[in-house]
Image (cartoon, helix red, strand yellow):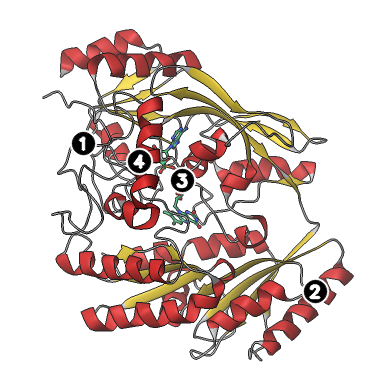
Amino acid sequence: MESLIDTLSRAVRGRVSTRPADLARVNRDGSHLHGCAWATVVPKDQRDVVAVITWARRHRVPLVARGGGTSLDGESVPLAGGIVVDLSGWDRLLEVRVDERWARVGPGMTNLALQESLAPLGLFFPPNPGSWATATVGGNVATNASGPRSFRYGPTRAWVRALDLVLGTGESVRWGSTVAKRSVGPDLVSVFVGSEGTLGVATEVTVRLAPRPEIREGLLVPLEPTARLGAIASGLSVARGTGLSAVEYLDGPSAEELANLDRFDRPRPGPLLLLEVEAGRPAEAARRVLRTRRALRGCGVRSRPQVFEDADALWTLRGRASVALDARVGERIREDVAVPLGQIDRLLRGIRRIADAERVPLYLFAHLGEGSWHPNFVVPPESAKAARVRSSLLSTALALGGTISGEHGIGAIKPRFLGRELGRPGVAVLAALKRACDPDGILNPGKLYPQEGGDGRSSRSPSGSAGGRRPGGGPSGARVPA
Ligand SMILES: Cc1cc2nc3c(=O)[nH]c(=O)nc-3n(C[C@H](O)[C@H](O)[C@H](O)COP(=O)(O)OP(=O)(O)OC[C@H]3O[C@@H](n4cnc5c(N)ncnc54)[C@H](O)[C@@H]3O)c2cc1C
């Protein structure tokens, strides 16, 4: 192993490390999984990324690109060992065109740092995941991340214009362009977004930007436990003149744990709706808040919203809901399904039935306006019970016309369920794409693609997680030197 890593140190100009502290940092992400990296490399530039990939192809060594390491399904955990390509230092804003509303960004720039750099220019990058302080733009792209503002602005996929990539073949390519529109066949930029580091390494991201509203008002709305959440989601989606950019939900137990952690000022205990109203001037903001209140009354919500002056602080707080459960509730599975708005109430009944049948405590939060739900079932993630809960939940979401992942991705936890959503032809298209971009299967093996024969119903793994037990993988799978 030592001599193998020596050859890597000679092949690249960037820093190669086998220090235990560096390895420990990259062996974890936001999931429960643990990896077994052999070394980390901080490439100096794009040429260095080519050198790492060429070296990895020659030696058939797994490579995992890494940004902030906040993914929740093991996406950035090196389960098959190998080398972690740490891009978190590639954190510069390279160029901004205010007239054309785009920015070229180093993939390791954090989402929040990008927002802070753009604010003085009157622009912003709309996806704002709860992890925005540490998650990187490269990671947002590779997971197609969303955030509260995706209610109005959509997920990351809608905001990427171009990508500079080194594919798993070692070839450097630029997919997309800075132009506002293109029609040149299926969109390769979209294909890369959400590919979880399995096709190539993004060395530069060109993002589309939106004009930053002058005023963003956060509203905290206490709800009755019996509130009709489906009606609220649909009602707020069609309400006119509200300027709503975010419609979020925390159930009573989640709000309680968050308040225990962060002691924020809230109207009263119980479930909460968290809204953001955008406006150009104070008078317009006041009008829009009034219209929002009227729309809420139309959905049966009579309580008075509490204004949260700093909307960004509201989203940072909301992002800590998961941290609060980590601190206070511990081991659990954090799920991530989405359904059409008209099916929200059925999904909720299904979720509660599953929790009751398995006798597991449940914490729920949601990007309500998008039908995107995060049920947190308090159950050891590797247990047979967790596997049953997950399987039933994903089947329920699919039966309601939804998806097995609204935003967190597939990672190492859901590959065996991919076929349930995409069907055999869909999985075959993805596998062909993988072969074209990464013929040796060196990039992030064990993630996203089902293992041979993994149709979502026949795997022997109780949780569907690779969990460090199944090295290699992917359509071809890197060899793992001893
Ligand atoms: C507290 C908390 C709140 C969260 N809230 C949200 C939320 O609201 N919405 C949401 O969508 N997600 C959320 N997440 C999940 C996570 O933050 C996102 O998936 C985020 O986009 C990951 O970014 P990252 O930089 O941490 O990526 P990493 O974890 O480092 O990597 C994620 C994936 O991207 C790949 N990757 C990273 N950089 C590159 C690159 N340059 N080129 C190619 N591939 C690359 C990795 O190989 C891996 O497959 C949350 C997570 C936490 C812990």
Which residue is disc 2 drawn over?
A: 288
Which residue is disc 1 drawn over?
A: 36
Which residue is disc 3 drawn over?
A: 143
In the rendered image, which quarter is residue 353 located in? bottom left
CB of mark 3 near ligand 1 (< 8 Å): yes
Residue at 20%, 46% in the rendered image: 453
Which mark lies nearer to you, 1 or 3? 3
CB of mark 4 near ligand 1 (< 8 Å): no
Q: Secondary structure at mark 2?
A: helix
Q: Is residue 108 left or right of residue 31?
A: right
Residue at 67%, 28% in the rendered image: 177
Q: Which mark is residue 85?
A: none
- Camera-side residue: 474 or 327? 474
Q: Secondary structure at mark 1?
A: loop
Q: Which numbered disc, 2 or 4, marks the residue that appears first in the sequence?
A: 2
Question: Residue 18: percent from the left, percent from the top?
Answer: 25, 25
Q: Residues within 10 Å of mark 2 (few under 14, many from 20)?
A: many
